[in-house]
Amino acid sequence: MYGKGLIKGLGITLKHHFGKKLTIQYPEQQPYLQERYRGHLYLEFEKCKVCGICVKTCPNGVLSLEDARDEVSKKRKLMSYTIDHQYCMFCNLCVEACTQNCLHFSHDFELSRYRREDIKTVYHRPPEMDLQQTATDLSAGPDDGSAGQEAQDRREKQLKALTAALDKNPQKLLAKYVDTEEQAEVLTRLLQADRNKAEKILAIMADDKDKARKVAQALVSKELKKDQAKTEGGNAE
């Protein structure tokens, strides 16, 4: 029958016209999102303990952070935290790995920006956090010496662990403080030949890793120069 398809099509159109509406008037009307929907990743800054597990867990390098050492408590504190949403695949691994439950996905799905760099969300340390910490330290009153003793015990324990590591596998330990395996071998030879020097280096490692790295590299550089001078002197003869 001629026009049968047209009539059938109009019937479907009329059926949906008088049926339940499936479209919404976006953006005036927002869509309904399920509770587990993953939109905008955000951080509760005050909860973060700067463990870095989330950064290591992320497969796409979306997360990065900057920290600093508190002058009073000597603990690490979070200074800034960056979430680069353009590389996020919403896998939820960082949220699951966070030990402090400070990473969450919101229902905000409007992530598009005019410029690529604007997709990043950067959190900076609020000044009131430092003020609150200072007030807490002042209200705590004078130190009874237990904290200092605890720190000393912790340092001695760390020093013993470093000494054991140096005796068991010196090159593996010292490789963390130099750039190449050759430098690690040179440093190992130096410290095994001079126990006093080894104890001084271990003490610096326990107190300040950055300083220990600088000292180790200086010792290696000095020793390599000596070896080079001996080699050149031997060739001259």
Image (cartoon, helix red, strand yellow):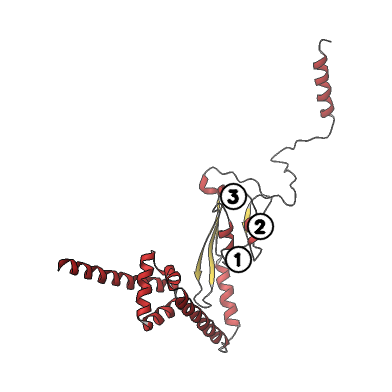
Local crowd size for mark 2, using a 10 Å CA cut-off: few (<14), some (14–19), many (≥20): some
Q: Quadrant of residue 176?
A: bottom left
Q: What's the residue type where badge 2 is placed?
A: His
Label 1 or label 3, whichever lies nearer to me, is 3
Determine whether 94 is above or below 183 in the image.
Answer: above
**What residue type is disc 1 on?**
Cys
- State which tag comes first along the sequence, 1 or 2: 1
- Residue at x 42% of width, y 70% of height: 171
Q: Residues within 10 Å of mark 3 (few under 14, many from 20)?
A: some
Q: Viewer-nearest of labels 2 and 3? A: 3
Q: Nearer the viewer, residue 70 or 87?
A: 87
Q: Closer to the N terminus: mark 2 or mark 3?
A: 3
Distance from the alpha carbon under mark 1 to that under mark 3: 20 Å
In the displayed structure, would residue 20 be above or below residue 207?
Answer: above
Quadrant holding the C terminus: bottom left
Q: Position of residue 130 (x, y in %)?
A: 55, 71
Q: Which residue is mark 1?
A: 48
User: How far is mark 2 from mark 3, CA to CA?
Assistant: 13 Å
Task: Tell me where residue 139 appears, x and y as whole percent.
Answer: 60, 82
| Residue named by callout 3 | 88
The answer to whether 19 appears left or right of 210 in the picture is right
Please, what secondary structure does the residue beneath circle 3 have? Answer: loop
Between residue 203 and residue 232, name the one nearer to us: 232
Task: Point out the tag, 1 or 3, that comes first from the N-terminus.
Answer: 1
